[in-house]
Amino acid sequence: MKESFIPVTSIASGIGLEVMPDLYYFPVQIVNVIFAGTQDEWVLIDAGMPKTADKITEEAEKRFGEGTRPRAIILTHGHFDHTGALKELVERWKVPVYAHILELPYLTGKKDYPEPDSSVGGGLVSGMSPMFPTEPLHLENDVSPLPEDGTVPFMSGWRWIHTPGHTPGHVSFYRESDASLIAGDAFVTVQQESLYKVMTQKQEISGPPKYLTTDWDAAYESVRKLNDLNPHLAVTGHGLPMAGQLLGTSLKRLADRLYDLAVPAHGKYVDRDD
């Protein structure tokens, strides 16, 4: 995957927030990375935009101490904005990477992601999407599939949930003890297609980013699956964390009406007659 700087950002970029004692989200331009765990043992979830390895490392050291490194990097999926700094961080930290087995072809040089669909509309980010890289990473022996039993390496109490639609191997992470959800791009809390809303971080539950979602039926089932968990807190790949009643009512509305609220009226990955 070519490392290209994408010239978009938000007002939240660089401002981290502890949402739980062991859960810290850090916006990098227009995407969130997550530090899960404590100083004794933590993992990085997703790896941000291209050319942001230094920012991610600096924030990790602010939180956990100089010279810290995670036990692993765990991916919700492999799109460029979630793996932009991945190769550099792996080389720097010498840690393993985990992803769903269906995502591995895109991380080991075997398969390109489908081209973004700028025709879905919704704003300037959609219009810019043809410039987003789709080439695979070449992690080879550095990436392994997530355990088949649903456990998450080095994240005690969490389980991974297959939530395809945005990508074939997209996963979310859920902790039953406190109903915390890390949703990746299964749904997001900002209208990601709109540059204005991305820049201002206007909070609203939205479906997965339209310009890179290729299977809307699967995306619908994934949102329904996550809504059925009744999460009390959600940290998503884009947008601010959401919790409590606002999360509950907003996510249920999306699950009930995703085809009306989130699926584009037209596009290369949409067939509204199905």
Image (cartoon, grey):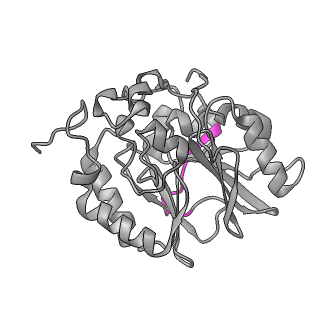
Report the quarter where the C terminus lies. Answer: top left
Q: Is residue 271 at all visible to an observer of this figure?
A: yes
Indicate the position of residue 228 as horizontal and vertical percent values.
35, 71
The residue lying at 49 percent from left, 52 percent from top is: 202
Query: Which residue is farthest right?
Result: 66
Q: Which residues are magenta?
A: 142-151
Indicate the position of residue 146 as horizontal and vertical percent values.
54, 52
Q: State the predominant SS element of the stretch in magenta.
A: loop
Given residues 148 and 71, the one toward you in this image is 71
* Residue 91: in magenta span: no
Which quadrant of the view contains residue 63?
bottom right
Q: Seen in the image, is 116 located left or right of residue 239? A: left
The residue lying at 55 percent from left, 56 percent from top is: 240
The residue lying at 49 percent from left, 74 percent from top is: 244
Taking 79 as reference, is 68 above or below it? Answer: below
Indicate the position of residue 151 as horizontal and vertical percent values.
55, 64
Taking 98 as reference, is 134 above or below it? Answer: above
